[in-house]
Structure formats: C-alpha cells, structure tokens
Amino acid sequence: MNGTVFADTSGFFAVSAAENERHEPALAFLSRASRLVTTRFVVLETISLITKRISPLDARLWHEKFVGSRAVEVREFDEELYGKAERFWRKRPDKTWDLIDCYSFGVMHRERIEQALTLDRHFRQAGFTARRSRNQRCSGASAKRRGRDALHRSAATT
C-alpha cells in the first residue's frame, strides 16, 4: 500500500460499527494507511448512515474521532470537479454509480489515489483497488442507499 487511501461511506461505516462482521478487516486495512482522504459529501452521507443505522450519538462520536483527526483530510466542494463528476455520471447509465461515487472517483483521479476503504463494488468497477470483506452477504451499497435515503428525507423536512 502506498499509504494514501480514499475513505468511502461504507468503509467508514464498517470501521464505526464494532458488531459488523467487516469491522476488523476494515480496521486492519485502515491501520496500514498513512493518509486518509475523503470528501465533505462522504462525511455527510456517513453521518446520516450512522445516525439512522446505529445512533445520533455514535454519529457525533464518529465525526469527532475521524473528521477531527489530523490523519483524515476532507476535500471540500469543488465546482469544476462536480461538473466533471456529473458529466461522467450521466455518461454511464449502465452503472448504478451515484453522483457521490462519481465525485469521489474524480478526487481519487485528481490526487492519484488508487485504493479505497469501501465495501462498494463501484470503486472496483471504476478501476480502483477497493478493500472489501470476504463475506459479501450484506451489500455495502445497500447500506449506502439507506443512509443516502435518510439524508434526503431529513433534507426534505428542513
């Protein structure tokens, strides 16, 4: 491993959910990373997922621990990159990639990051090395969808 890893929502969730069967492999993978990069979109999506699937308190604790860490670099919104991600997303109707995934791919390409802490098969489909557990009984993508749906529901009520 070159040391730099992109963290996706499903990877953050696996690290956060101690009872999850993917928790230990995710922690082991994370321990070998010297630098962790993510986006503000992933942070928001992760907070929503942890809030809905575990608890609001755990979401706050995750935020303090990971986002407050010097080891985690959060990339803020970049309008030009967003435009590229949106065009890429529109060009691939054959994939179930979402716009947040495509934005993440753009950050990874821009920063030459090849590895992702994720349970999401989309990163492999896009040509990256993705850390996934051996047991794929429960899809990380479905966990992302539930978290994303919760984020949309909460945004609609504000």
Image (spheres, rainbow, N blue to C red):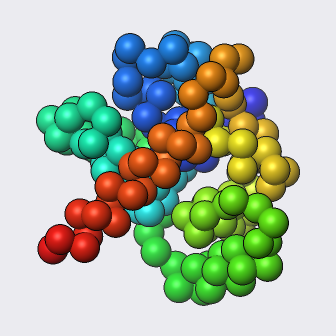
Q: Residue at x 70, y 74 (%)?
A: 89
Say whether residue 64 is visible: no
Provide residue 63's location: percent of width, then percent of height: 27, 43
Q: Residue at x 35, y 45 (%)?
A: 49
Rendered location of residue 42, percent (x, y) = 46, 55
Dividing the picture into quadrants, the one containing residue 110 is bottom right
Position of 117 with respect to 152 (left or right) is right
> Where does the image place residue 32, in percent across and percent down from the top left?
61, 23
- Give the answer, above or below, for where 122 lies relative to 65: below
At 27% from the left and 42% from the top, the residue drawn is 52
Return the x and y of residue 33 as percentages of the image width and height.
60, 31
- In the rendered image, which quarter contains the N terminus? top right
Q: Quadrant of residue 115?
A: top right
User: In this view of the protein, can residue 59 be seen by the observer?
Assistant: yes
- Horizontal placement of 20 versus 95: left or right? left
Whether residue 72 is situated above or below residue 150 in the rendered picture? above
- Which sits in the foreground, 85 or 153? 153
Along the viewing direction, whichever of 108 and 123 lies nearer the viewer: 123
**Which residue lies at the image location 44% right of the left edge and 69% below the top edge?**
76
- Judged left or right of residue 139, residue 63 is left
